[in-house]
Image: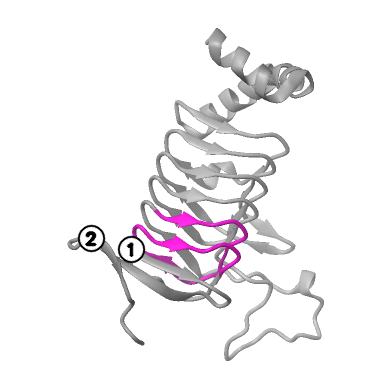
């Protein structure tokens, strides 16, 4: 323990060392209280987090998130009322300033790795299908969607800046390249990238190598 502390001091200097040390008691207390509320033994959430709707969030063990996490199960918006279900698996890791929000259902599997500034949401401000909300209504006044979902399978890796749109299922073991916008389902063990995200390669588990995706 002493060796790791000394190494941290040498690598980062006195300012980072003492500012980290000063904030540690509050962080430990806050995380212990959050763990109790969420019914887990261990979690670690960094500073400046925005957490809402905790009674509608199911958290797995050993969750870890960096600075600025926005985690929200939306139960009300204006005159609207929702019954959201936000489920997070075990050993999930999230970097800084990521935003996860739901009005209906977001499910994140085990051992998922999420980069910085990632957005995962099951809803939009207004609807954009056959019965589209009028764009003459200011965005903040448009009703939120309430029946969409997002499913992220086990062992998925989302790079920095990824956006996962409503209605998307990401299969087990997917990799999503940085700044991609995922607007449709991704099969298991597939690497996608771009705006909108498209398959680049697929990992063949039996052969143990990457192969070209099947054409659409």
Q: Residue at x 62, y 12 (%)?
A: 6
Q: Residue at x 65, y 54 (%)?
A: 117
In the picture as drawn, the residue positioned furthest to the bottom comes out as: 130
Q: Is residue 187 visible?
A: no
Return the x and y of residue 138 as percentages of the image width and height. Answer: 82, 76
* 189, 79: nearer the viewer: 189
Q: Is residue 129 visible?
A: yes
* 164, 54: nearer the viewer: 164
Q: Which residue is mark 2?
A: 205
**Does residue 98 sit above or below 150 in this rendering?**
above
Return the x and y of residue 202 as percentages of the image width and height. Answer: 33, 69
* 94, 76: nearer the viewer: 94
Quadrant of the snapshot with the C terminus: bottom left
Q: CA distance from mark 2 to mark 1?
A: 8 Å
Q: Quadrant of residue 91?
A: top left
Helix, strand or loop under label 1: loop
Q: Quadrant of residue 211?
A: bottom left
Helix, strand or loop under label 2: loop
Magenta region: which residues? 156-180
In the picture as drawn, the residue positioned furthest to the front comes out as: 10
């Amino acid at each position: 323990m002493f060796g790791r502390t000394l190494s941290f001091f040498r690598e980062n200097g006195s300012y980072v060392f003492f500012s980290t040390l000063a904030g540690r008691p509050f962080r430990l207390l806050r995380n212990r209280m959050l763990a109790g509320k969420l019914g887990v033994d261990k979690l670690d959430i960094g500073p400046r987090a925005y957490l809402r709707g905790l009674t509608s969030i199911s958290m797995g063990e050993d969750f870890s998130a960096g600075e600025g996490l926005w985690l929200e199960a939306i139960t009300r918006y204006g005159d609207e009322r929702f019954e959201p279900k936000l489920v997070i698996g075990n050993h999930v890791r999230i970097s800084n300033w990521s935003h996860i929000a739901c009005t209906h259902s977001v499910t994140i599997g085990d051992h998922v790795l999420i980069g910085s500034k990632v957005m995962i949401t099951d809803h939009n401000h207004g609807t954009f299908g056959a019965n589209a909300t009028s764009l003459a209504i200011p965005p903040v006044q448009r009703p939120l969607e309430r029946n969409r979902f997002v499913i992220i399978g086990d062992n998925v890796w989302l790079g920095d800046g990824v956006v996962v749109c409503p209605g998307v299922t990401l299969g087990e073991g997917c990799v999503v390249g940085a700044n991609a916008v995922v607007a449709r389902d991704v099969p298991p063990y597939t690497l996608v990238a771009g705006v909108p995200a498209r398959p680049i390669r697929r990992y063949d588990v039996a052969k143990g190598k990457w192969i070209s995706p099947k054409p659409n």
